[in-house]
Image (cartoon, rainbow, N blue to C red):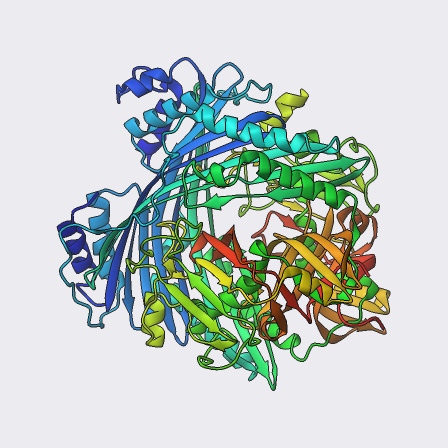
Amino acid sequence: MFSSDFLASCIKTALSRGGDYADVFVESGADALIVFDDGKVKSVSTGFVAGVGLRVITGRNYVYLYASDPTEERLRELASSMAEAVAAGGSGTMRALPPSPLEGGRHRVTRDPAGADLGMKIEILKRADAAARSAGQAISQVTATWWEKNQEVWVATSEGRFAHDERKRLRMPVVAVASRGDARETGQADSGKSLGLEIFDRYPPESIGAEAARVALVALDADYAPAGKLPVVIDKAFGGVIFHEACGHALEATSVADDASVFSGKLGQKIAHSAVTAIDDGTMPNEWGSASFDDEAHETRRNVLIKDGILESYLVDRLGQAKMGIPANGCGRRESYRFAPTSRMSNTYIAPGPHKLADLIASVDHGIYCAKMGGGSVDPATTDFNFAVREAYLIEGGRIGKAVKGASLIGKGSEILMGIEAVADDLDVAAGMCGSSSGSIPTNVGQPAILVRGLVVGGRA
Amino acid sequence: MDKSTLELLSEAARKACANDAAGTKAGAAAADAAREVYYAETRRLGLSACKGAIDSFTDSRSGAAAVRVVDGKRMGSAFTERIDGGSLAAAAAAAKSAAAFMDTDEGNVLYGGAEGGLVGLDTAWSNDSVATATKKELALATEKRCYSLDRRIVNVPTVGYGEADSVRAIANAQGMLKAERHRGCYLYAYVIATDGDSTETGSYGEEADDFAALDHERVAARAVEEAVGKLHATEPASGTYRAVIKNDAASALLGAFMGSVSAEAIQKGKSRLAGKRGQKVGSALFTVIDDPGLSTLRHAAFDDEGVPAGRLEIFREGVFLEALYTLYSASREGARPNGRARRGGATANVSAGLINAFVPAGKDDLEALLSGLGTGILITEVQGLHAGLNPVSGDFSCSARGFAVRDGKKADALRNFTVSGNFYDLVDGIEARGSDLREDLSDPFRSPSLAIAALSVSGGDRA
């Protein structure tokens, strides 16, 4: 790793002809990907990641230079190129860096997967595979994947921040295929935390495999979902993808600062039903989206975004701070050194309410109960969003009825936030990957069960 | 890619690490196995314009090498972003060590060819002689053009220009050393239109071989046309409609299911095309050709395992003819590999994929297709395809935008609805192909506009 003095000299060079602010991001890491497919180890791949990124912000604008295979010589070259690329102007100066970085380490793992026996990891995948296959004769295929990322970052800034953070994340998604004749359906289950091998004490591989198979088998016997606007009960945990898409992205400075969000200029205004309080919390111990520092060397924070329906805060990164005049709040994130950081969610959830799931279902005469959700997307300027439903049931007369499949849910976030009428008390979070301009990053979505009116259920007409 | 890197790869693959220059113990451990080294490097430049200024500028050079080792029908792989003899030796050792934990599989083979082939490595690129200032001016001119085209354009959050100059190289222990250079640039605009209480967005991007081919007036016009065309949209009634799916949307929707033509997916029961080779699975108008030789932008002389890549007919007149093979799936089936192994860089795994596939254009333009439709719906956008489809069953349900079609003409804009159905029903229901094959080559699958017999629409209350 580079010394504090060396990083400071590079930042100084980068700011030598102009610029208000500069930071350098150094990354190294080891990844492991093991795919157990078709009853066999399909692939074992390990890798060594190493790169560096250098950024200068001037006014509302930035220049970002990056390179893999970082050496002192290469970083010096980047700093010189940066001085050439940055237009004159700006008032940035280099504040002294501490001799050694502030250490992260708030999300330590107890049984580090890095360097652990490969055979043991494969055994865990086999256990998930066996559990899925034993769930029913119709289970015809299973894929279990070991996704291990060990990322170490050093971030130094012209404002004198210097931080080192080690992030270890482990995830094991399992996909099961159920077949009957020409019909084929899939089910997926997952675990993902900033944990080591101890994650499997909480989520035994067998339970993940069995859950993937259960979802596939339910879909195999399901009819297509109906079409039209229906009341929807969305269950806890990954159901929180509705808030992530319908609102979360539109609260990121990335779109707010450029007036490209429907929520620009609405701080202090009512944007959601008073039943809704929403939080983004990068400090949650050992959660999938947690870190000690963000990728701009700010400590991660718990940010209350919406309180009782009122917009309280945006997610603001350092560039957003320059554009909006609102202090950065620990959410500058990126996939790797190949991306400049921007404002991103970490662990985002709707806070628990007073109700029970059963109450929500009992209150619906004809609607849909979405037990498991898939991914989605949104246009922050309009908040038109969509997301997929992985497991769903009709609600008839306040009771859960037959299983339905093949639906997506769509709506306009600014309207749907007002349509979240009731929130249950059973908060849970679930791991996902979120894509945006700074790449694909681990984020948790979460919520208790909620009742929403006004969504279009994209079933068959 | 400089010559010393090429030589390094060739050396690493041929001698691997037994007694190589690095002389490491790790290297020695990797000897006596078949091996392949894949290397990819990219130089990127990107910039964006917003509010009359260049608000972001990115310049980068990055690369990574991956080593695959096959030892007794077991394969391991490892990558490194540090490129030197010692790091490659360590990657080879890690790959060999990983292979020991694999199950044996007939599919675990590497390409045994020894031929060479260096494509376009030393040719000059016209973009390099275009000043960065000129590229910035193009983005700024595009932004200005967007505002000037329609007073309802209230914001142009992003106009992006980018270019990439990349090289991929592959070498094996038999002496094969192939490398191919790709260059391309793009221009993209994202605009917001507002009129009264209606706000909509539009975007359009195009990719080209060189800077001179980018047309900023066209990019601006299409982004603006999309945004303002969607203003004051209403919800369609739920129901089943005769439909025309416009070329961009048809490319996205059909392309999302092309994973089903992977031979491995078929072999493992993850595709409904299992057992369907030679059988009719779609309308006689459904033909898909994958031709890597047709354009320089998506050219590929060989795939990412080194296998020569030629023209393939995947579907002809509704009949499923040929799957996409990697060496893994071909070897498992005893089939001839057809050069469709793709990897998204050295850090990604190999899987089967299209290179430059398309549904051939028909004779009628979009207006003629709508005229033939009479009454129905024109689908111009589909969103959320990454989640809203099931590639195994073929079912899809995704958010869409479009227009009502009345008396054979495009009428009111429509919003807040989904289209759903099954891929196999969709291609069986193709009634006509438009003459407007999607021009933009940024995706590996393109389609013209398609007239479809029936499409399920979920929106407001039924009519």
Check the picture and name the quadrant holding the C terminus of chain A: bottom right
Tell me, yes or no, if residue A295 can be seen here: yes
B382 to A51, vertically: above or below: below
Does residue A306 appear to the left or right of B324 in the view shown? Answer: left
- Image point 62% across, 77% down: which residue? B228
Does residue A439 appear to the left or right of B384 in the view shown? Answer: left
Tell me, yes or no, if residue B263 can be seen here: no
- Image point 55% across, 26% down: which residue? A41
Check the picture and name the quadrant holding the N terminus of chain A: top left
Closest to the observer: A443 or B314? A443
A381 to A78, vertically: above or below: below
A48 to A399, vertically: above or below: above
Locate residue B167, reporting x and y percent.
Answer: 43, 40
Locate residue B281, reporting x and y percent.
Answer: 81, 41
Locate residue B183, reporting x and y percent.
Answer: 46, 48
Does residue A231 appear to the left or right of A123 in the view shown? Answer: right
B242 to A263, vertically: above or below: above
Give the quadrant of residue A73: top left
Give the total number of marks visible in the rendering.
0
Closest to the observer: B328 or A192? A192
Locate residue B279, reporting x and y percent.
Answer: 83, 35
